[in-house]
Amino acid sequence: MEMLLFGVQALLALIPCPGAAEELFEVSVWPDQAVVKYGQSLMVNCSTTCPDPGPSGIETLLKKTQVGKGPQWKEFLLEDVTQNSVLQCFFSCAGVQKDISLGVTVYQPPEQVIMELQPAWVAVDEAFTVTCHVPSVTPLENLTLILLKDNQELRRKDFRNLAVASQRAEVTISAKAQREDDRCNFSCHAELDLSSHGGGLFHNSSAIRVLRIFELSQRPQIWVSSLLEIGMAETVSCEVARVFPAKEVMIHMFLGDQELSPCLSWEGDTVWANATVRAMETGDQELSCLVSLGPVEQKTKKPVHVYSFPPPILEIQELYPLAGTDINVTCSGHVLTSPSPTLRLQGAPDLPAPGEPAWLLLTTSEEDDGRNLSCEASLEVQGQQLSKTTVIQLHVLYKPRLEESGCPGNQTWLEGMEQKLACVPKGNPTPALVCTWNGMIFDLDVPQKATLNHTGIYCCTATNQLGSASKDIAVIVQGLGEGVSSTIFIIIIVALGVGVITIALYLNYRPCKKERRKLPYRQKEKKKEEESQSAAQQAGKYNAHNC
């Protein structure tokens, strides 16, 4: 009996007390770290090791919905999570309650990275600012911003040690513009690292911004005449120096409201624009040149005066008069010329009165054929003296003439040489020339190989609409031997003459030279006179001897 009681007591000792079992239970939550994108939902599971749990749930300010449960667990959906929070997951077991905390971190990735250049076009040596900011990014202490120039890192900034409430997600640098910065690409890279909260790495980059550098400090210069003639094409130029980049300069040129079409050229930092202008209205106008580069413009204006000055009018009563005819020649200013010009007619005896034409009565002669008659008009415009001339050639009609200068009556040919009959008639209209030899027409255009048979008289007749003229030409064909003998004889005569003159001059000079060498210095002036008399006497003897 005692043994039985001992066994029962031992068995009871092995059975745990119900209150002790409940005190050993655990409460757990999943996930153990919660990272939720702003406005999204989160599923939370609370569980316990209590075999028969009592009241349980989640304590949170977030909107929650129980979506599942089991004997030892419950699952909740937290919706529209917009702020960081800490929730409590609790269970009770045999009157004892235990809970566990779960921190919920809300994040906003850098979905928009904004890069700004202020200004986008910067003058050389002026300051510019590069700014990068990320709106609506959370948590700020996990953000890093990196500024890049092309692929080079300019600045890196994180926000770990800064108060969230007083800080924007922004990084800024300032610099002074240099020419080598032109067309540099600036960008910004943002990284949100949530690994410390159990999340991932989010990153994004801004659009690339291109920095433009320019230099346009000098005003353009205009090259144009102060006077422009209406309707006449004139070249005008506009030049601007110390400009960068030169090939991106835009140049517009205007004459009043009329826009020109300039042609641009470049050399180094200088740009030229050349344009052709035709003024269509008289009076004072303005030529302007507008140079633009990026956001900057420079403009220069220059006054010009547009005038009308057509050439004077030259009128000849008859352009093709007969020789001996009286014709009137008139020189007058054009009706569009204002004020009236000063006129001068070549050959006119007097200058006309202002506003009156100049005139001349000309009796034509054969020598006037081909003569140029000129009419000159002078006009003062804006203090400058201008002149224009009109020229007309006069054609006088006259009968043919066979003058000795163009058609010699005696001609000598050399036997065996190619020869042509030399005869050019004068006359207007140009005469036709026909020459006959031994009753046959002689070809004047084809050279003839001269023979003794070509010796003779050639009869030439020149004819035009006004009449004709005839002339006999005597041709002598000289044998080749005769020509050579005559030539040699002439050469010998010339050589002898030169020799005699040279000897005479030598004889006249040599004695005087010898005498001068023997004279002392103080007698030179006296001897000079004696030498001159001696030379004259010898020259007289020499001339008498030659005669």
Image (cartoon, rainbow, N blue to C red):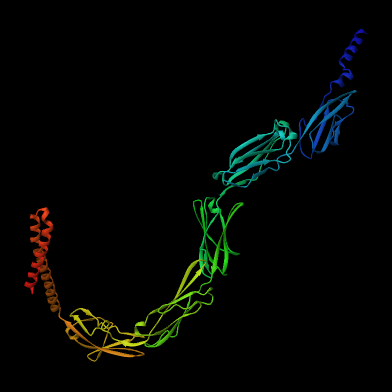
Q: Is residue 25 left or right of residue 347?
A: right
Q: Hey, which residue is sitting farthest top in the picture?
A: 2
User: Is the residue 346 above or below the residue 282 in the image?
Assistant: below
Question: Residue 526 in the image: x percent, y percent?
Answer: 11, 59
The answer to which of 198 and 301 lies nearer the viewer is: 301
Total residue callouts: 0
Q: Is residue 522 left or right of residue 141?
A: left
Q: Quarter holding the C terminus?
A: bottom left
User: Is the residue 176 above or below the residue 70 in the image?
Assistant: below
The answer to which of 268 and 43 lies nearer the viewer is: 268
User: Is the residue 123 above or below the residue 433 in the image?
Assistant: above
User: Is the residue 264 above or below the residue 382 in the image?
Assistant: above
Question: Residue 233 in the image: x percent, y percent?
Answer: 51, 68
Tell me where residue 486 sits by quadrant.
bottom left
Question: Residue 125 in the image: x percent, y percent?
Answer: 57, 43
What residue lies at 11% left-to-right and 68% top-to-bottom? 501
The answer to which of 287 and 11 lies nearer the viewer is: 287
What residue lies at 49% left-to-right and 66% top-to-bottom? 384
The answer to which of 390 and 183 lies nearer the viewer is: 390
Q: Quarter holding the N terminus?
A: top right
Question: Residue 377 in the image: x percent, y percent?
Answer: 47, 74
